[in-house]
Structures are given as structure tokens and as C-alpha cells.
Amino acid sequence: METIERKAHWEKIYSTKHPNEVSWFQEIPSTSIGLIKELNLPSSAKIFDNGGGDGKLVDHLLDMGFENITVLDISSHALEKAKQRLGDKAQKVNWVIADEAHCDIPGQYDVWHDRAAFHFLTEESDIENYINTIQKCIKPGGYFIVGTFSDQGPKKCSGLEIKQYSEKSLTEKLQGYFEKIKCFTIDHHTPFSTTQNFLFCTFKRMSK
């Protein structure tokens, strides 16, 4: 899917649906919060939330005292919703409108977080571009936290085909640049009373 098509799709979703009308909604993103807390980062750590949309992880990161947060999404509607929800706190966040498959983010980050975004990249060229981006943008010794549909999860989401991952296939995709710290699967219970099986992993950027 080209960037223009991808953007049109997500702008429509975020301009027509309330947060609890999308399957990925979480009032409290407890798994992501827990994985970030495990890293024992200083408040000055640079954290990047890829595909954050109008999700509430940024709210909790601010409440945890983090001072250098960047949220990227392809949808301007999504980010505007998040800004409106946060009010004055939104000024403490760096907001980026870009396509994760084709973006050039300046600087390097201590943590790159991605929940339910990476699996929407199904073309190998897009996947390679994304992996090249995180290789450049995560500091050596920094972390990649990713939550993606497992091989027992859905095959489509939001009307789009997705790419499932197992612990083995995801680790192989990232080999050479990232060392696996941990992986586990967990069920996400959607607002529609359905269940989606996710694979969550934490990887460490190798120093090379």
C-alpha cells in the first residue's frame, strides 16, 4: 500500500470513529507500561511511540515523569485528538505526522515503542525500510519494544491485511542489529468483546 492510500485510510478511521470504536483501544496500556518500567530509565530518556495515534500511552508516560517523548502517526486527526485530550500537557510532547514505512526521523532514541503498528506493513520493501529506520534511530544499547499480532492472532485488522509474527520470525527479522531480551504472547480483549492474541517483545540495540 502506498503512503497516500495508507494515510487516507487512517485519516478516515480517526475522523469517523471514537476511541472505544476501534479494536486496539486500551484505557490503560498496562503491558507497554510494564515493559517500559522494567528498563529503569531516567526521566530524561528519549522515548519514541510509533503509530501512537490517539492512544493513551503518552498520557501515562507524562504521568511517569518522562520529559522527552515523541509520538508519530500517519493520521493528523489521530494526533489532534491526543493533543486535545492532553490539553496544556500536549506542549511537552513532540508530535510527528509521517508514514512509518517511509520516514526519516532525526536523532536517536533510548526506547522505540510500537504497539499494533508494525504488523500493518505487509510488503517486504516497507518492512525493510522500517527496520532500517529503527536501526538508525535507536541508540546502541537502546531498546525496541514491539507488540504485534502473533501467529495465533487475527489476519486482518481495520479492514486491512496484516502480517503475523512468531517469536522466531520476528527475532530473525531483527537479527544482526538487535538482541532479544524477552518475548511473550498475551490476549488483548477488544471493546467488542473479542480477543486478539499479541506477541510482545523487548529487543536491545546491539553496539555495532
Image (tube, helix red, strand yellow):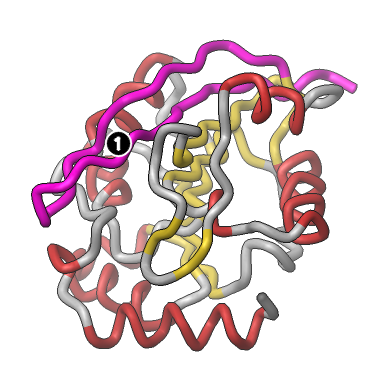
Residue type of the residue flagged with mark 1: Gly
Q: Is residue 195 magenta?
A: yes
Residue 115 position in % (x across, y down):
43, 44
Q: Is residue 53 above or below residue 38?
A: below
For the point 49% across and 54% down, the residue is 117
Q: Is residue 24 magenta?
A: no
For the point 31% across and 25% down, the residue is 186
Residue 93 position in % (x across, y down):
40, 59
**Residue 166 position by quadrant:** top right
For the point 16% across and 68% down, the residue is 21
As helix, strand or loop, the secondary structure at mark 1 comes to loop
Left or right placement of residue 160 versus residue 205 in this view: left
Residue 118 at least partly seen: no
Left or right placement of residue 199 versus residue 17 in this view: right
Where are the magenta residues, as a range? 179-208
Q: Which residue is outermost to the right?
A: 208
For the point 63% across and 58% down, the residue is 121
Work out whether residue 39 or residue 189 is closer to the camera in this orientation and state it.
189
**Residue 20 position by quadrant:** bottom left
Label 1 packing within 10 angstroms: few (<14), some (14-19), many (20+): few
Q: Main secondary structure of the magenta part?
A: strand
Work out whether residue 197 or residue 109 is closer to the camera in this orientation and state it.
197
Residue 39 position in % (x across, y down):
46, 17
Q: Quadrant of the N terminus?
A: bottom right
Work out whether residue 136 or residue 161 is closer to the camera in this orientation and state it.
161
Q: Is residue 9 above or below residue 32?
A: below
Residue 2 position in % (x across, y down):
69, 80
Kindly identify which residue carries mark 1: 65
Residue 46 at least partly seen: yes
Work out whether residue 130 or residue 96 is closer to the camera in this orientation and state it.
130
